[in-house]
Amino acid sequence: MRVTVVGGGVVGTMHAWQAIQRGHEVVQIERETEARGASLRNFGQIWVSGRASGEELETALRARELWEGIGARVPALGFRANGSLTPVRGDLELAVAEAAVARADAAARGYKLLTPGEARTLNPALRGEFTAALYCERDAAVEPRTAQLALRAELLKSPRYRFLPGREVREVIDAATVRDDHGDIHAADAVVLCTGAWLGGLVRELAGPDLPVRRVRLQMMQTDPLGEPLTTSVADADSFRYYPAYASPALDELNARQPQAPTAAEHRMQLLMVQRADGGLTIGDTHEYEHPFAFDTVEEPYEHLTGVVESLLGRPLPRIRHRWAGVYAQCTDTSRVVHRQQVRDGVWLVTGPGGRGMTCSPAIAETTADELGW
């Protein structure tokens, strides 16, 4: 079988990976010289802890298994099973963590409630004051800025794989046959459009104006090296308000009696933090849903995140060396893991994983391959 994958981000690259592993020929087309969208502008987290029960959690757990296998084969991914800690303060936040540990699927997520001493044994960099910490053993991480490069380097070892950068697919001219903006025609048995947040142009033409996917903008930052290991990923209790796994009467009580700080509420914020291979910290994030998006980044969210991180680390944050904004595509029904739609004979659109893209992409691609009979 011949497969054309349109899009060089992590979702597209994982579809190419699945096709190659199953013995097919793949042409992957990317409109930039390399992917530059949400696949690079994220935490690199394989984030199981907060996923909704059912399909979302099952997808994340399967993806976690696939990431570990691919990471063993491609060490340059920087895969590490580092787990995560969410320190909590006070009885209201503690009650949400206790409710999470009492879930029927807590063991599948690897949830444990740790004392401050146990948490610091696991992650000595957390010197700030907190009441307890929710640990999720199944969380993991990769290096987002280089993951696609590492995967592609492995794919290029196969004579059945070609990568064509700097080309934009403009037209579907026949079943599973597309034309790019160089005028070249690519015929295949299946085309998978993994165009990320690019929802206009050809995507709108094929899927129509009522595509149930929206764009979400975020702000993040990265520091100089911390100078010591941050042995787990770290979240704050605002993440309880954001991820569906933490829905409970205890969360309702937290929201009612202890609302978010004004800046965090205004920018729909949570803290997520991961240490990069060079020792720096990737820190975020915000969520902006209303169009048109701002074209600039604003300082108040960065100042808020700096304060939260310093209170957990018990030390000043290293110098901020990068600040950026990114945009990802999210299903408007946020309970859906991804939007997968046949838009023409032999042509499928796969988009809208939202903030789950990095986590779930291997399993999303596996499901596509299974459903299409690859």
Image: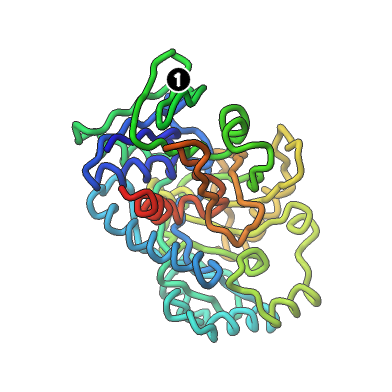
- The residue identified by callout 1 is 180
Q: Nearer the viewer, residue 117 or 242?
A: 242
> Is residue 166 found left or right of 159 in the rendered image?
right
Residue at image location 60% in from the left, 76% down from the top: 130
Q: Position of residue 92 (x, y in %)?
A: 70, 81
> Is residue 82 found left or right of 344 in the rendered image?
left
Residue at image location 65% in from the left, 57% down from the top: 333
Quadrant where the image shows the N terminus: top left
Residue at image location 42% in from the left, 75% down from the top: 121
Q: Nearer the viewer, residue 21 or 291?
A: 21
Query: What is the image's colouring?
Result: rainbow
As drawn, which residue projects farthest toward the top?
A: 183
Q: Position of residue 38 (x, y in %)?
A: 53, 41
Q: Say if residue 216 shows up in the picture.
A: no
| Vertical relation: 346 (above or below) 225 | above
Q: Position of residue 353 (x, y in %)?
A: 54, 51
Considering the numbered disc 1 on the image, is that residue within a helix, a strand or a loop? strand
| Vertical relation: 152 (above or below) 84 | above
Q: Nearer the viewer, residue 176 or 133?
A: 176
* Image quadrant where residue 291 sits: top right
Q: Position of residue 173 (x, y in %)?
A: 47, 23
Residue at image location 34% in from the left, 35% down from the top: 189
Q: Nearer the viewer, residue 140 or 261?
A: 140
**Pointer 1: residues within 10 angstroms few (<14), some, or many (20+)?**
some
Q: Say if residue 50 shows up in the picture.
A: yes
* Image quadrant where residue 360 sits: bottom left
Identify which amino acid the numbered label 1 is placed on: Asp
* Numbered circles on residues, count: 1
* Image quadrant where residue 108 sits: bottom left
